[in-house]
Amino acid sequence: MNEKKMSRRAWLRRSLLFGALGSTFLLLGAVLLDVWRAAGRFSSARWTGVIALVDLPADGTFPFPQQGVALLRKSGRLAAISLECTHLGCLVNTVDQGFFCPCHGSEFGPMGEVYSGPAPRSLPWHAVRISQGRIWIHSGKKQPAPLWIRIPVTEPGREDRT
Amino acid sequence: MSRAQRNFLDHLHSVSVSRHALRPTTTWGLGIACLSCLAILFITGFTLFLYYVPDQEVAYERILHIQTTLHFGGLIRNLHFLAANALVILAVLHLSRVFFTGSYKGRILNWQYGLLLLALILYANFTGYLLPWDQISYWAIKVGASLAGYFPLIGPEIKTFLLGGEQIGSETLLRSFALHAGLIPLLLFLTGLHLWRVRKDGGLAAPEGLKEAKLPADPWLFRAEAAVALLTLSVMLLLSCYFDAPIYERADPFHPPNPAKAPWYFIGFQELVSYSALIGGVVIPVVCGLFLVLCPWLDRSKSCGGIWFSRDRLKWSLTFGIMLLAQLLLIAIGLWCRGKNWQWINPF
Amino acid sequence: MGCSGPVWVNRFFYLMVAACLAITLYVLAVVWRENPDHSTRVIADIVVNLNGKKVREHCTFCHPGGALAISVSGETTRSLHPDIGPHLPEKLGCTACHLGEGMALDRKISHGLPGLGARKVLRGRDLQASCFQCHKTAPLMGAEKAWQGYRLFIGKACNTCHYVGGAGRGGRYGPDLSRIGSFLGLEQIQEAIRDPKKDPQNSIMPRFPLSKGQARKIAFFLKSRIENPYYATPMQVQAGLIRLPEVSLVPKGRKLVEGEALLYRKQCLSCHKFREQDGRIAPDLSFIGQIRDPVYLHDFLENPSKLIPGAIMPHIFLTDDEEHKLVSFLAQQAVAQPTIGGEARESVPEVQRGKQLYMRFCQSCHAADGDGRGVLQPNLANFPRAFTGNADYFKRLSPEQMRRSIDQGIPGTSMPGYGKLVDPVARDRVIALIYQAFIGGAESDKAALDELVLPDSPLPAAARIDDLFNARCRRCHGIAGTGVGPEALRHKPMPRNLTNKRYFGRLSDQEIARILFDGVPGTAMPAFRDQLTSQEIWGLVGKIRTLSRTSIP
């Protein structure tokens, strides 16, 4: 039997052997990998209360850095824009002409469109809703286009709550 | 196979191995099984590290998180638990094999390394026991540490060391975790030393007059070892499917379970201490420990190692056998026959 | 390639390679089947902060928006979480009210493991057990039963023995319940109230006459007593700024004199009986002013277990003025009652009159069927003498002894003297009834008893007597003779407390020796006549005299 050239049988046996061993450890490795990367599967996305409707001043842009959003109120409609810079995720400041990122100088317009700087995309928008007299944003769902909702003229019986 | 690989494997064992060493009845593959368990423990343990927090407030919740929230997390924890307990059993069996075949002859140093390893394994097990911070582990550690406190002079010191203070608390948890994890390098080092000494002492102990043909270590020894390792892994995997690592309620410092029992491998001593604190807690453990440490020097029988229950070592084998059986019996009694207030109960 | 080696190695190796692969596949399949959607679905993760402590939960993974998943014939529908008004579930999280283990994500563990049940999930009406964790203990909509539970807690005088943070002074006889909700589940608390002697068996807590619903209500209140309460900062708790509200126990709409109001206000009637008000735990106080003298009452209120060793009544905080008013009220009330003997109308037959008296005074302890297991018996320090089936005991008892016990009572026990209350004729009627209905046989049927005299020969040395005591008496009477040896709980009647000075002070040496020689019929006390010598028994009589600090022969 030649050392260099294996017989077909031996080759078959060998590849079967390594195949079986390899797939066993691949499977077990995959299990480990699954557990290792499980940390990324958690989501705290949920409806988060921002402010009571009665406390929100008339038309304008109001930043809520704690929730990472700014509420835009315009002629009886409401939307929530994300304050997370699309470049590297810094929290942008609200300025007169729109938003300004302090980290790398990205400038955004009043509707989050990129004016200048390294930011690749416009600021995204959050889903927003009004319930029990409070404004809620959903921390998970982000959309490229604004999700406007209409502010009800009166929330029956709920105005007094703050 | 690359030259480097081949080179590495060639140095793990000597080039050839006697047929006697390969025979299953020589070692029953216990050492390799221990090594496999250790490997499983390292890998699963590392995975558990990623999610565990050694803090009184959240440790228990993190275990629940691992056990139930992470996909396969339960499997990993079960494997870790089973391998840890299997390691204690296998290590004791390995020790018994070495003793009954008298293989410590001429390998006194390695015997001592082995004993040290056993102690480390028990300690790692003991510290790991507390980490879930549930009712059973909390009180088991409390009882276990109190058992250590019975030892004269150094007893209270050991207890304080184990508990990180006078009372079991957040310090205990932190130090149990640190020592559980911190022992890994030492365990690795000693295991390496233990294996290297086997090679250095000329492989497995064998009866002298044996004139059997030798076999190349590659592939025979490697295949046999790999088979045992795979067997261990398979058994652990299969068991982890059916035996969940225990989890009880949150630790409650005001309501001890009745009876509060030490971890199972120390229950024998708890049983002994329940008869007499001095005899059971001090004299017997010390005598047993000294016996194990000193037996390679005390045993002056002529026969060489590698023969099961050789005739001129009968009294030694008997002594050790009785010791082992007595300890097993005590563990069984403590585990199954003791109910409330350590009263005798019928296990059936 | 190595054909010369043992064949089994190769076979074993190949087999193991195959087996390991197969088992790995099998295990993965099993684990996958057990929780199929974990790996694909995003795991809900909520962090709320109550009281400065962050709590992380995965509850909304299975209960999105707090919905309860209801499985109807295989199809899962989701009900919505009811509107809980001003509470914001997003801020409160789930486990603050519902308990359970928020970090777990399986049915069993996340809903609280069995055992002490501290984290057992609360649902439905049980949820009101959580309200007073945050809210001030006060009438609260939705927590009506928990509030009633608090009223019951005070009304049944639980706080005289148990301390609960904010309930004022006292209550140091039983375990502190300030944090009980963090350690025990609702069911466990309810069970402990309903059957206190189940665990531990030597618990002195009486079994209160509470319905299951009432016990549940108290459990609702107690479940809200938690370790780090949300209703106050730790500093406020420490400084005693948190007070539980006062509950008025005096019945409304009745004009009461000060003394009688005290009976209510000091929670006496939570256990004791006074006229029609009956706590069913402790003896009747209606005539107590007549059958116990004011000095006794004063001393008893000062320290109940001094006069009746082993009495479970705790010390009650009373100012001197309150105590005076209470004692004089009780004495006054008793005098206002007519002597009972003359009370019975002539038309009532002789036997009926005895029966009336028995039911009025004796039955609560000695039981209606005379076996000594009356309603109050479990709460008494000493077992009331059994009449039924105890003829042997009464054959040894002289008529004088029996009459003395009824007229003067038995010191050191709960048996009061009825001499002032019941005239001799009426008393004899009761004795006749006891013999006729319970003991059986005539009163004159007495056993012949030998004379017990102190032997002339010297008694054994004290050390020998101590050894004897340890060998023969310790297991039941305890090493200190207090009647609670290791085996005491196995016996009913429980072994006598040998340190009871007042009880043994009344017994003559001969009477004590009689107990040792011939045992006590109807109890576990054996006769030592055949087992010990006369000297040894008389030595033990001396030992009892020493233990009880009464005169030494």
Image (spheres, rainbow, N blue to C red):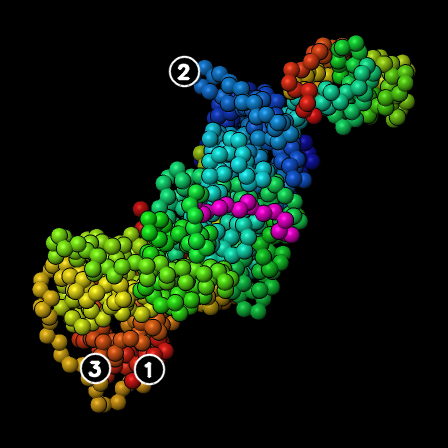
In the figure, is residue C188 to the left or right of C524?
A: right
Confirm whether the magenta stretch covers residue C292.
no
- The chain identifier of the residue carrying mark 1 reads C
Please tell me which residue is depicted at 43% across the width and 53% down the height of the picture: C257
Picture mark count: 3
For label 1, count other residues whose C-alpha is less than 10 Å away and answer few (under 14), some (14-19) or many (20+).
some
Q: Same chain, marks 2 and 3?
A: yes
Say if C139 sits above or below A11 in the image: below
Helix, strand or loop at label 3? It is helix
- Per the image, the residue denoted by label 2 is C73
For label 2, count other residues whose C-alpha is less than 10 Å away and answer few (under 14), some (14-19) or many (20+).
few
Quadrant into which the C terminus of chain C falls: bottom left
Quadrant into which the N terminus of chain C falls: top right
Helix, strand or loop at label 2? It is loop
**Location of residue C108 in the rendering, given as x and y in whole percent from the top left corner:** 47, 32
**1 and 3 marks in contact (CB < 8 Å):** no
**2 and 3 marks in contact (CB < 8 Å):** no
- Per the image, the residue denoted by label 3 is C534
Please tell me which residue is depicted at 51% across the width and 18% down the height of the picture: C78
Sequence-first tag of 1 and 2: 2
- The chain identifier of the residue carrying mark 3 reads C
Residue C28 shows in the view: yes
Place residue C187 in its image quadrant: top left
